[in-house]
């Protein structure tokens, strides 16, 4: 699906995926230099997504490795997103970029997640978890 962002006067090809929450996966050649803080809010609040969306910007490295940066709805830029990594892997398999049934390494700003989508479309994710803060409410 193509989405037009009037603020940047550009069309973006995206794959919409639900992981129980909405994701717009955009494959691109360069995610490191992407000004995600500028483009992310336009995706999140686009009229195409009345309940807003998470957006994953994904660079394919090879058939088993992708690099992903994420804009999470309501949070902005985050270092990692498990559902976003799963959505990105599912979109890559659906597009024939990656192979289902094989581990896909998703490299995020906060580390690596390992995603496998089997032939029954069941997705499993493994990776580290770290405590990043503690608070009381």
Image: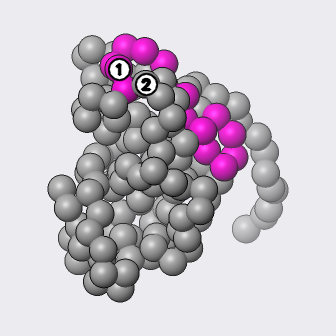
Asked whether residue 64 appears in the rendered view, the answer is yes
Position in image of residue 84 (x %, y %)? 46, 46
Graded by Cα atoms within 10 Å as few (under 14), some (14 to 19) or many (20 or more), the crowding at tag 1 reads many
Q: Secondary structure at mark 1?
A: loop
Position in image of residue 17 (x %, y %)? 28, 46
Which residue position is annotated with label 1? 99
Residue 101 falls within the magenta-colored stretch = yes
Q: Secondary structure at mark 2?
A: loop
In front of the other: 28 or 71: 28
Which residue position is annotated with label 2? 63
Residue at 40 percent of width and 34 percent of height: 89
Q: Are marks 2 and 1 in contact (CB under 8 Å)?
A: yes
Residue at 79 percent of width and 62 percent of height: 135
The residue stretch that appears in magenta: 98-112
Tell me how the rendering is colored.
one colour
Q: Is residue 19 above or below residue 44?
A: above
In front of the other: 5 or 45: 5
Considering every residue shown, the one lying at the far bottom of the view is 7
Quadrant assignment for the C terminus: bottom right
> Does 99 sit left or right of 59 as displayed?
left
Residue at 30 percent of width and 81 percent of height: 9
Position in image of residue 62 (x %, y %)? 47, 28
Q: Earlier in the sequence, mark 2 or mark 1?
A: 2
Quadrant assignment for the N terminus: bottom left
């Amino acid at each position: 699906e193509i989405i037009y962002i009037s603020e940047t006067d550009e069309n973006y090809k995206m794959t919409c995926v639900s992981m129980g929450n909405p994701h717009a996966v955009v494959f691109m050649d360069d995610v490191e230099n992407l000004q995600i803080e500028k483009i992310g809010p336009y995706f999140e609040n686009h009229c195409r997504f009345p309940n807003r969306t998470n957006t994953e910007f994904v660079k394919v490295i090879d058939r088993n490795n992708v690099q992903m940066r994420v804009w999470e709805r309501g949070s902005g830029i985050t270092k990692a997103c498990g559902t976003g990594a799963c959505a990105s892997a599912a979109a890559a398999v659906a597009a024939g970029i990656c192979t289902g049934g094989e581990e896909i390494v998703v490299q995020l700003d906060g580390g690596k997640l390992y995603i496998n989508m089997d032939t029954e479309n069941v997705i499993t994710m493994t990776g580290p978890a770290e405590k990043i803060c503690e608070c009381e409410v």
